[in-house]
Amino acid sequence: MHTTYSASDAKRRFSEVLRQVRDGKTVTVSYRGKPVAEIRAIRESPETMEARLDDLEQQGILVGSGEPRRPMTPMERRPGALKRFLAERGV
């Protein structure tokens, strides 16, 4: 369910707005009749990177390539540009 409050009503009824958000509802706040903010519950973040990617795909934020995902491995650590720059100058 979706509820809309004017900014002044949301301020006056803030406890009620929070109660609705805790119950899983999304609340929109409008200013002069135009929506300006949306208040919704914070979703718990998945534990692993794979779970996070799956979650982002389900939300429609990420679009998969259609190919199976390869396991992620850490990149090899190499001296960075700053370290090389400083080394060239003898710092």
Image: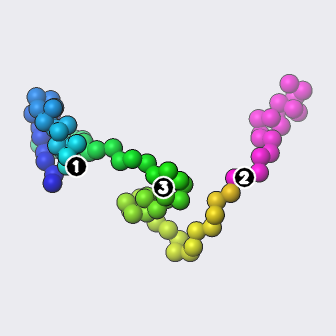
**Over which residues does the magenta segment extend?**
74-91
Q: Amino acid at mark 3?
A: Arg
Q: What is the C-alpha distance between the residues marked 1 and 3?
A: 21 Å
Instruction: Check disc 1 and report the residue beneath it.
Output: 24
Say which quadrant the N terminus sits in: bottom left
Give the secondary structure at mark 1.
loop
Are the residues tagged 1 and 3 within 8 Å (C-beta)?
no
Q: Can you say whether 13 is above or below 75 in the image?
A: above
Instruction: Check disc 2 and report the residue beneath it.
Output: 75
Tell me the residue at 48%/55% (across/down).
52
Q: Is residue 28 visible?
A: no
Tell me the residue at 63%/67% (across/down).
70
Instruction: Check disc 3 and report the residue beneath it.
Output: 52
Nearer the observer, disc 3 or disc 2? 3
| Residue 51 falls inside the magenta stretch | no
Q: Position of residue 14 (x, y in %)?
A: 16, 32
Nearer the observer, disc 1 or disc 2? 1
Q: Amino acid at mark 2?
A: Met
Q: What is the C-alpha distance between the residues marked 3 and 2?
A: 19 Å
